[in-house]
Amino acid sequence: MNPRRLSAGFFLLVALAFGVVTGQAEESWTAPGPAIGARFPSALNLQDQAGVKRDLAELQGAKATVVVFVRSADWCPYCMRQLADVSGRLRQFEALGLAVVSVSVDSVTEIAEFHRKQKIGYTMLADPDGAVVQSLGIRDPAYGPDSEIFGVPQPIIFVLDRAQVVRAKFAERGYRGRPDLDRVLNELGRLKIG
């Protein structure tokens, strides 16, 4: 084989891997859902792990509420790890005057089991049909109506002040990535809420 052709092929492969062949930057991505500064358009009004209907007003922290949207506490290992990690850092959130609540497309039974087994210290809410996820515009578009997991959200964390205005949001593109909790807590510590 021609060494120049081999070299050119290697360069092309490396360039493709780094997304520089087209001369365009990687496609920009904006986290879905309500923007920072917008009023959060949902009261949630979902059942918690005990089957009790809860709304956002009663779940508020002294200064703000952190709402963690995940796909599932039943079958998504990335979500399960994130939910447990958030629970492990709960005192740090509370020290900032923040209450934490999670929302997933699980049933009440599924979140109750996870809550009990993992000794989760915050409220978990069930949105089994994905209605709240859909209303917020955070449904993962990778899964169409024919998918078994249609309605799952893109992983995202909203921080809502007591007037239910979005003060911060943290998201990663794709279902495997999760916002780094050190960064989240650091940024929330600098954010003046309340």
Image (cartoon, helix red, strand yellow):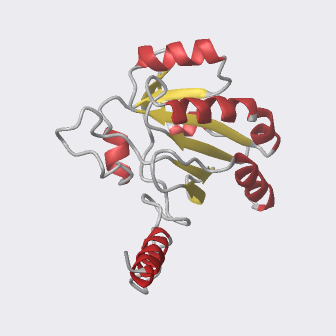
Residue at 22%, 45% (x, y): give it.
144
Residue at 79%, 46% (x, y): give it.
96
Answer yes or no: is residue 194 visible. no
In the rendered image, the residue lying farthest to the left is: 146
Question: Which quarter of the rendered picture does the N terminus lie within?
Answer: bottom left
Task: Return the x and y of residue 164 as percentages of the image width and height.
Answer: 55, 52
Task: Return the x and y of residue 181 as percentages of the image width and height.
Answer: 70, 46
Q: Where 114 falls versus 156 (above or below)?
A: above
User: Going by the image, does 59 lie left or right of 47?
Assistant: right
Q: Say which of 44 and 71 sits in front.
A: 71
Q: Where 50 falls versus 66 (above or below)?
A: above
Q: Say which of 99 and 91 sits in front.
A: 91
Instruction: Tell me where residue 189 sits by quadrant.
Output: bottom right
Residue at 35%, 54% (x, y): give it.
137
Question: Which quarter of the rendered picture does the C terminus lie within?
Answer: bottom right
Instruction: Tell me where residue 45 sits by quadrant.
Output: top left
